[in-house]
Image (cartoon, helix red, strand yellow):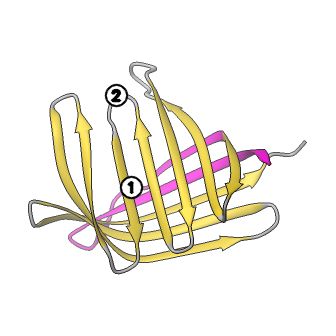
Amino acid sequence: MTKEVKISVCGVQYLDGEAQEPVRTVAAGTYYKKKDRHYLLYDTAEAETGAVTKNRIRISGDCVEMTRSGSARVHMSFQSGVRHRAEYMTSAGMLPMDTVTHAVRVTETEDRIGVRLEYALESEGMQLAEYQLEIMACLLSG
């Protein structure tokens, strides 16, 4: 069954242990569950150009995958204690990165699903920053 949901994404980057300004996105989206996997789909638009980016989040047990397609394309996987390669495609070319996931926490109730990720991004063996990402999807009121 497909459901209309409100999806909130809040990310905080930590540079040298200092939290930077949180980046928040709230969008209407779609939720569905298929074979014990949860899917969240939503679109965002760039402020300057209006270009649309399609976002897909797949939650399967302790593994979370995020795919973005638009002016920049990336597929990132998060699984506690596991390093995953992510290739971030930009207009300037491909930037290889690794996600090193410290923690994945998924909470689920009848009318909402939440995800908390704690991870580091590395490029060419150098840590770029630590991140904390919280995703919450709740049913839209009928």
- Residue 22 relative to residue 136: left or right: left
Q: Which residues are magenta?
A: 1-28
Q: Does residue 9 show up magenta in the picture? A: yes
The amino acid on which the numbered mark 2 sits, given as a three-letter code, is Ser
Q: Residue at x 26, y 74 (%)?
A: 17
Residue 95 tag number: none
Density class for disc 1 (Cα within 10 Å; few <14, some 14-19, many ≥20) is few
> On the image, which quarter does residue 4 sit in?
top right
Q: Inspect the image, locate mark 1, and give the three-letter code of the amino acid beneath it.
A: Glu
Please tell me whether residue 108 is drawn above or below residue 66 in the rendered image: below
* Residue 15 position in % (x across, y down): 24, 65
**6 lies left or right of 94:** right
Residue 106 lies, in percent from the top left, at: 59, 72
Q: Nearer the viewer, mark 2 or mark 1?
A: 2
Identity of the residue drawn at 39% across and 22% down? 48
Precedes in sequence: disc 2 or disc 1: 1
Quickly name the residue at label 2. Answer: 71
Compared with 104, 24 (above or below) is above
Return the residue at label 1. 21
Q: Is residue 55 magenta?
A: no
* Residue 128 image offset from top left, x and y in percent: 18, 61
Residue for point 56% across, 66% down? 60
Q: CA distance from mark 2 to mark 1?
A: 24 Å
